[in-house]
Amino acid sequence: MFRLAHMSDVHLGPLPDVSYRDLASKRVVGYINWQRNRRRHMHDAVIDTIVADLKAQAPDHIAVTGDLVNLALDGEIEMARLWLEMLGAPQDVSVVPGNHDAYVPGAFGKVCRLWAPWMNGDGINHPIDRDTFPYLRVRGNIALIGVSTARATAPFMANGFFREGQAKRLAKLLTETGRLGLFRVVMIHHPPVRNAVSQHKRLFGIRRFQKIVARNGAELVLHGHSHEPSLYSIASGTGRIPVVGVAAAGQSPGGSHPAAQYNLIDIGGEAGKWQVSLTRRGLTGSAIPPTDLETIDLTTVPDTRKRLVRT
């Protein structure tokens, strides 16, 4: 049995000192949003509680599907690297970037340089950039495939992009790992399904992504971005592929989104006979430790366009 933990949308705080020069960009919008909203609902104490509980479950690997920071300030990106070092060794933690990690032009490159040990594929020692995604890591009979949808966008926009070049590389990885009989987990920040988020936050390339995984196969897709514990599916020739979201890891109770959660996915069996169970653990109050919120058998996913699980 392989145990995979999944968390997302950490939005580490507090913000470091911000200069007027830093705000001479889209960051001014994000800074106002932080002061009005995120500062009150995203808390390090909540993240610390979630991480402590996650580690107590002894996962074999941790997947983090983006948005470690808020405005992609240099100080935030460095702080996120220190947080990743605390979370786990690079071989035990796989990260894909989110839109906040590429909040302004130039930020994505800094993230690639500082977070590279957690975002490179097996045997890859050269610098990483957009063209090194998706990356592949194999742990036992599990293939972890990290896709990047992160790009700087205009103010008030938080879209992701999955383009043709990355699609071709993903198709190749899915085909190769499928031939090896591996359980293929695709990690992506933006939900690759329609109507999961509002239009200004949606992924451009949903149809392209779904065609690739339907044609070449995958056993599980993990995403963040929506701050919702969700379950969708993508139809393929061999059945339906679960698409699993998660609440923001730093969300305190009392906000408009569910309080902080993480996913535990237990994977057993072999190709053609996989047994997969999803357990959501998270906060249900302001002063209690995380608990099991629900357990879902992912071996058979219902044919549904959208199933949101609110707790």
Image (cartoon, grey):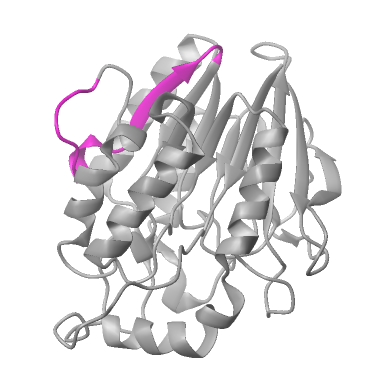
Location of residue 158 with respect to 275 vertically, above or below: below
Q: In the rendered picture of this protein, how many numbered marks are placed on residues?
A: 0
Can I make out residue 51 in this image? yes
Q: Tell whether position 139 is magenta.
A: yes
Q: Name the spot of residue 6 as percent of width and height, x first.
A: 60, 42
The image quarter containing residue 250 is bottom right
Give the residue displayed 18% in from the left and 43% down from the top.
Answer: 129
Location of residue 59 with respect to 263 vertically, above or below: above
Location of residue 108 with respect to 61 vertically, above or below: below
The image quarter containing residue 271 is top right
Query: Which of these two is toward me, 155 or 4?
Result: 4
Q: Name the spot of residue 50 as percent of width and height, x first.
A: 66, 51
The image quarter containing residue 137 is top left
Magenta range is 124-141
Give the residue displayed 82% in from the left and 67% down from the top.
Answer: 285
Can I make out residue 245 in this image? no
Q: Name the spot of residue 309 as percent of width and height, x first.
A: 78, 60
